[in-house]
Image: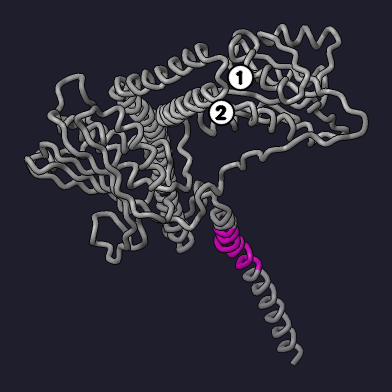
């Protein structure tokens, strides 16, 4: 039994030793062929996850499973890297294409904006050229009308000189001269308004009053062979449109009608209120209330082919140099821009009729016009003295008349012929209650004079008198001149000037009373 136990002990020791050797060998083999390849694959997988597709698994024995897995992983990473490079190249190409397209769009937009600006400038220039052409065509008639006015004025002045002692005759002649001057004033204002160049300003217009005023001008300018008639129903609702452009359109249409009646005829300007119910009644006209304006003549008329091309810009049947072909095109643009429409009907030998539809507005006529000054007198404030007025105008006749009118109203007037002389007077210590100046003068103009005078004498009220027409002049002057200021347009009567002077003086504290 002892031998048996000894043999068993040796067998157990031998088995333990063999087991330890086998376990050690197994650990070495596992470390070499399993743990290290696994760690290498995990490390390279971590780099792939972080975006480094250039990383590769270490080379292993391709006959082993880990070697085959490493080869497959490396092939997959290479494919992904190629795909990413392809996508990156495609994205860069797309970005370059988008940037190039963006540059092209920017350049195209710049060209479009330049073309739009050029077109607007061209349209404005063409509109002004059309106005100038119309004024030129009307110049003969305007000269005839002014000759009649001057005849009345000069004749009346001669009669006043010969009848200096006949107060009744002088009064009668003075009234006649004033009527003639008022007629000249009306013609001048219409010409200045018609020919002005400024931004369009929509206004509420009384169509009947506008047509009546145009009839006076057209009757004298279209010639004795053309009989101008106005047919406007009383109480027409107002329309919202630019007065200057509307007058330009009507004058151009009247001029075209005159050219179509070389042997004379009848021109009718009519207006009535209509209601458009269906959108298809008139081309481009929406349902609503309108004023239907018609300019009809008894002239030669147009053929169907000419009628179809008549509204096109620059189309004209007149000889070279006698027409631009913009009249009807401008009329259509005005009608559409005002929210209305235009239509033309004509037959050869039966005359032509041009219809304008302008939408009715609910605004009251003259609601955006500044109120005129009512007759005022300065407020008395204790001891009275005559207010001192500095009058500046480069025209001796105008200056003398205005000074006499102010003196008759009780003001102490100092006259100067230009802005420099007026500033010299102020520099010498002259103190004035009010400054009256012309706008257009050589050297220092009226605006600069008022600014400098108000700098030297703060709070000095001023009145600027100008012969220019239009609201643009008033807005420009109003932004350039500060303080107490008013703008009057020539011709201005003595009463109007005195009223404005009194109104400005009354607006100041410590107002002086004019000697009456």
Farthest residue, direction bottom: 1
169 and 307: which is toward the camera: 169
- Relative to 13, does residue 318 appear above or below in the rendering? above
Magenta residues (range): 24-42
Looking at the image, which residue is at 71% across and 11% down?
Answer: 415
Looking at the image, which residue is at 66% across and 38% down?
Answer: 373
Q: Magenta stretch: residue 209 in it?
A: no
- Relative to 17, does residue 319 appear above or below in the rendering? above
The residue labelled by disc 2 is: 473
Q: Is residue 475 visible?
A: yes
Q: Determine the image quadrant of residue 348.
A: top left
The secondary structure making up most of the magenta span is helix
- Relative to 12, does residue 127 appear above or below in the rendering? above
Give x and y (percent) for residue 361: 45, 55
Q: Which mark is residue 439?
A: 1
Mark 2, Cα crowd under 10 Å, few <14 / some 14-19 / many 20+, is few
């Amino acid at each position: 039994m002892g031998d048996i136990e000894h043999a068993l002990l040796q067998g157990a020791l031998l088995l333990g030793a063999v087991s330890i050797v086998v376990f050690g060998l197994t650990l070495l083999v596992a470390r070499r062929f399993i743990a290290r390849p696994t760690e290498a694959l995990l490390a390279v997988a971590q780099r792939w996850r972080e975006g480094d597709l250039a990383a590769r698994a270490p080379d292993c024995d391709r006959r082993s499973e880990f070697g085959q897995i490493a080869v497959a992983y490396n092939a997959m990473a290479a494919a992904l890297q190629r795909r990413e490079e392809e996508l990156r190249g495609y994205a860069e190409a797309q970005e370059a294409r988008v940037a190039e397209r963006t540059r092209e769009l920017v350049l195209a937009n710049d060209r479009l904006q330049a073309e739009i600006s050029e077109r607007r400038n061209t349209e404005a220039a063409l509109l002004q050229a059309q106005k100038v052409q119309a004024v030129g065509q009307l110049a003969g008639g305007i000269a005839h009308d002014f000759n009649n006015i001057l005849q009345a004025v000069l004749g009346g002045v001669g009669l006043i000189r010969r009848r200096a002692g006949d107060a009744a005759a002088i009064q009668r002649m003075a009234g006649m001269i004033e009527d003639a001057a008022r007629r000249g004033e009306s013609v001048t204002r219409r010409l200045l308004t018609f020919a002005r160049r400024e931004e369009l300003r929509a206004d509420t217009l009384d169509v009947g009053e506008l047509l009546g005023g145009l009839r006076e001008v057209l009757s004298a300018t279209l010639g004795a062979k053309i009989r101008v008639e106005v047919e406007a129903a009383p109480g027409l609702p107002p329309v919202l449109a630019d007065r200057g452009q509307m007058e330009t359109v009507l004058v151009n249409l009247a001029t075209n009608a005159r050219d179509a009646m070389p042997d004379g005829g009848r021109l009718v300007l009519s207006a009535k209120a209509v209601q458009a119910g269906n959108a298809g009644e008139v081309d481009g006209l929406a349902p609503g209330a309108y004023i239907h304006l018609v300019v009809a003549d008894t002239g030669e008329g147009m053929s169907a082919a000419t009628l179809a091309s008549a509204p096109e810009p620059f189309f004209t049947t007149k000889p070279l140099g006698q027409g631009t072909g913009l009249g009807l095109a401008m009329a259509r643009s005005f009608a559409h821009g005002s929210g209305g429409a235009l239509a033309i009907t004509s037959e050869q030998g039966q005359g032509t009729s041009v219809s304008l539809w302008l939408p009715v507005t609910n605004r009251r006529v003259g609601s955006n016009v500044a109120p005129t000054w009512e007759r005022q007198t300065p407020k008395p404030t204790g001891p009275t003295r005559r207010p001192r007025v500095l009058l500046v105008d480069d025209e001796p006749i105008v200056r003398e008349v205005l000074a006499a009118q102010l003196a008759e109203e009780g003001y102490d007037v100092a006259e100067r012929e230009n802005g420099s002389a007026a500033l010299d007077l102020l520099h010498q210590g002259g103190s004035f209650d009010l400054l009256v100046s012309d706008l257009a003068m050589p050297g220092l103009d009226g605006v600069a004079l008022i600014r400098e005078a108000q700098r030297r004498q703060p709070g000095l009220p001023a009145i600027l008198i100008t012969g220019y027409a239009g609201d643009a002049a008033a807005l420009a002057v109003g932004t350039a001149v500060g303080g107490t200021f008013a703008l009057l347009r020539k011709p201005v009567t003595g009463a109007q000037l005195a009223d404005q002077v009194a109104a400005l003086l009354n607006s100041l504290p410590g107002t002086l009373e004019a000697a009456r």
